[in-house]
Image (cartoon, rainbow, N blue to C red):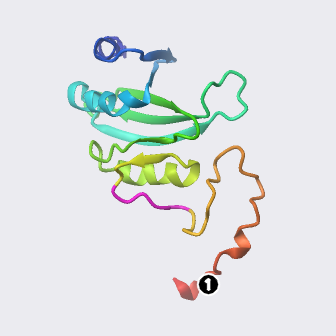
Amino acid sequence: MSQTPIIDSLNADFAGLTTSEFRGQTRIVVARDQLHDVLRTLRDEHGFDMLIDITCVDYLNYRDATERFGLVYLLARSDDMRRLTIRVMLSEPDLSVPTVTDLWSGADWTEREVWDMFGITFDGHPDLRRILMPEEFTAHPLRKDYPLQGRGERHNFPVLTREDG
């Protein structure tokens, strides 16, 4: 299904969007300062009522990458199951974007996961804390500069037994 009317509408409202299509999948790259407004427009005006996932890609050492991280939002419309991928590019030291929990309450858990694994901060998130790693863990293990064997931090964690629950 062609997304051309949606893309044309977004391009009329937001300058500087980059779009591409591959095998019927449409991708849009937006600037950080436009991200929340673009996602709100897609939900309210174009019917993308489902946030399927939020994930991140670490482009460290990619030959053509100009930014370190690509934060990815996967959206769908429940009436016809059209899908759309929205990406915002981020680099250190500013790894923060506005939360979308006000648009989709299910973003709560996926934003926490991305923060935990990659260190992307979601400004305005109601409960941004670790969800997969222990609170004592200080790194973000899905970053490409995190060593495969870890940094020796496991021996510092409390040992949990079956009796602990």
Could you tell me which quadrant the N terminus lies in? Answer: top left
Residue 151 in picture, x, y percent from top left: 75, 61
Residue 90 in picture, x, y percent from top left: 53, 34
In the rendered view, tell whether residue 113 sits above or below residue 25. below
Please tell me in which quadrant of the rendered image residue 132 appears: bottom right
Residue 71 in picture, x, y percent from top left: 50, 36
The residue carrying pointer 1 sits among few (fewer than 14), some (14 to 19) or many (20 or more) residues within 10 Å by Cα, namely few
Please name the residue that numbered disc 1 is placed on: 161
Residues shaded magenta = 126-132
Q: Residue at x 68, y 21 (%)?
A: 64
In the rendered view, tell whether residue 1 sits above or below residue 115. above
In the rendered view, tell whether residue 69 sits above or below residue 158. above
How many marks the image carries: the answer is: 1
Residue 70 in picture, x, y percent from top left: 54, 33
Q: Residue at x 72, y 24 (%)?
A: 63
Left or right of 104, for residue 67: right
Q: Is residue 127 magenta?
A: yes
54 or 81, nearer to the observer: 54
165 or 108, nearer to the observer: 108
Secondary structure mostly seen in magenta is: loop
Q: Label 1 amino acid?
A: Thr
Q: Residue at x 45, y 54 (%)?
A: 112
Q: Is residue 88 magenta?
A: no
